[in-house]
Image (cartoon, helix red, strand yellow):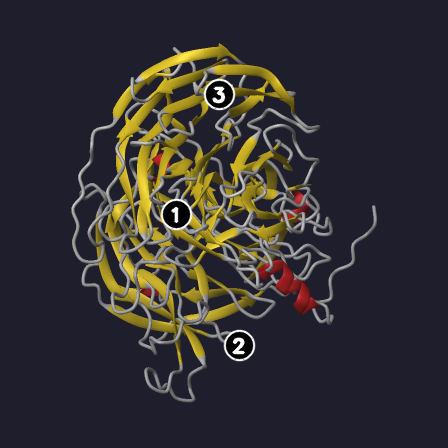
Amino acid sequence: MQKRKRWDLKSPETKALVDEIVHGTFVKEGTMVAFPACFPGATAQIPADESHITALDVSADGLIYGGTSGRKVHLFVAMFHGVTGLVFDLGWLEGSRRCEAVCCAKNGFVAAVNGPTGGRLIAGKYQPLPFDLIQEWGFSRSPLDDLGEAVKGEDIVHAVADGSGTKIIGTTRSHLFACDLEGKAVKAVAKTRAAGQIVLGPSGHVYGADGKTSLWRYDPRSERLERRWVALPAGRWGDGSPKWAKEAKSGTLYAVDSQGRIFSFDEAKFSKELGHTQVAPVGAMAATFDGRLFGACGSGISRLFCFDPRGGSVRDLGVAVSVIERRRYGYQFGAAAVGRDGEIVLGEDDDLGHVWLYFPKIVPR
Amino acid sequence: MAYETKFYQFTEHPDSDSCWSLSTGPDGRIYASACAEGVPGGVVKLVRYDEEHDRLQYLLDLDEMVDDPRDSGRATQCKIHYSFAPSMHDGVLYMATHLSGPPIDRPAYSPWNSWHDPERCFRGSALLAFDTRKDQVLWWDTLIPKEGCRCIALDEERGMIYAVSYPRDHFIIYDIEKRRRRDFGRIGSINSQAIFTDDRHRVWTSSDYGHLVRYDPEKDSMEMSPYMLPHDLLYQNGFHSVFYDAVRQPGTDCIWAVTWIANPRLVRIRLNEGEWGRVEDLGSTTQGRDLTLPMNTFRDHCGGVAFAGDGQLYYVASRWKDPQYNPMGDDHEEMEGVVTRVNPKTLKREEVTVLRRPGHCAQYVSRGAVDHNGDLFFGHVGPRPVGIFKVEMPPDRKRKDAHLPIRTWG
């Protein structure tokens, strides 16, 4: 083994390298804000070990709905536009341990929640905008509506709302299920071997992994399931993958495997590998309005990444840190969504998890 | 008349720039960590005060003992932070290593930056059991993979060590007999610099915004108090008001602590009163200053909290020349470490001496302890090679075995 020489601190390269090591570590572009899971100064935070944020979705009016994991699941709404600025705990579910998905549907949100007897769907009402959270306010909690078990005794893996917002489509380890929100009826559609997330495509079809080599396609309108619809590209699938993100304007879907390889999917075929994240696995990702895909990758201390389809490259954005609202490092993220104005919303999957906002760098024209 | 002080420099460890740990061992003697965090490839040496010859003894190099050589290319075993814990029944002094020193061929180290880098990432905090009766290492184990250890506390009765990790600020539980660690999860972003146990086996520390954090083994849960530790309401909001140092008043349930923020507060907590104890704000330990200037952490500081044989509390608080707030004369150093004595009944504070280090200021003290002869010792952080101070207690204020009941946290 080559003997290492002691670094000479008086060498001219020292300052630049120290700067790179110390200051090149944290968010290298854009700005992050960690917002606590409460109304700061007005309510208590969700308890530390009940606040791992593992599910997020954004409603049509730009409010963020989410769910936590830990000793208890809490469902919440977060709002940061206008005279708002809070995370409101909409309620908690005794005995529950993990929230796998929150889906913003037509008339309310639905959470996929796992507990000791398996997965259940829990519906809640949308929260109206408050009057003014600087001046005066009043909040009340509406009861949550238990829509029942997804599939008896089975944990839910993931769920999405369909294009009409009247159905929830989801998976357990061994079933695809559908829930009609108007009839409040949940039924198993077919036996499948689920892995990773599912996604709603722009055509209205839902896609999910059919084992480790292909995707199934399900049409919620006709209730038709097509097995092995398309082959997954070469990669390592399973272990929580694929993870999906959708760019709303173009409808481009992005999938990432458990090694951090990024692909796009046009509902007929996958692209070649577009790039890969610097470390894996990817914890959460979302694509903003200009097509850039942002996410967090790596265990223990995750790093942010950006895939820009224009340049076709994946860049390391460093470790998440917030110096606004709360001074906090962000180590693990369990969910991501795109906010009203294209900001990235990240759910911190950690004790005392915060809702993080990432405002990407604006690229000069 | 001022107490006599003497400085003992770590002359056999010229790289040493900090003495973060100083504790009384189970044998009543003083142990210190000679740390080297500012030089590439720096390592920590275990040092003991040799009272017979009035000198320091260099006992071991931690990198050699835990098989993590200084020239490995990884971040080095450069420190023992607030991580000594004496075990009385078997004469063992537990110690846990910490990170921050650069790999030998790099000028700096960031644990965040190198987390995923197998070549550079710190191997992990090593927990080492040192038999003070035989002067030998009994065993070592990895306490926290990839992370350093900020501070530890020992529950000797139950054979458990509790620790706080850095940088992720996780609470770690280690079962000594089973040699098994458990990561109980994250507290926040800023380490509390102290962790301690109470007579109900509960474990106390603090969070980023100065909330008390308590692990209760009976419930196996970690709770956070709704209250913040005292801070200056004029300009502080609780941020960074974490514990810096804490000591139990012998024979009581009272913890005396100082915080790690500008104008560190002296705090007394009666642990068994009410749900979260009764927290008393006893005021700032340091002088006034220009509040528009963010204060240097190494200038405005208080540490070395210890009870001595006279039943009085001692700590070392910094003071410094300031033309407006403290215009000290030429007979003072630019910055000084003032040894202060507090009467726990009347709360009267009395300056008993100033630490003198030839040629340098000595305003920063990390930890303090009293040895079995009743004298006070303080760990110092400053220009290398650094060292420790001995403060000779006046005969009428010292007693044999003044270190008992012993402090079991770093």
Q: In the depicted view, which residue is nearer to us: A155 or B234?
A: A155
Name which residue type carries label 3. Answer: Asp
Q: Which residue is mark 1?
A: B407
Q: Which residue is mark 2?
A: B360
Tell me the quadrant of the picture where the N terminus of chain A can be found.
top right
B383 displayed left or right of A271 = left
The label number, if any, that marks residue A219 in the structure image: 3
Does dot 1 land on a helix, a strand or a loop? loop
Q: Residues within 10 Å of mark 2 (few under 14, many from 20)?
A: few
Whether residue B22 is visible? no
| Position in image of residue B238 (x %, y %) | 31, 58
Chain letter belonging to callout 1: B
Query: Residues at marks 2 and 1, common chain?
Result: yes
Name which residue type carries label 2. Answer: His
Q: Tell me: residue A12, above or below residue B29.
A: below
CA–CA distance between discs 2 and 1?
A: 30 Å
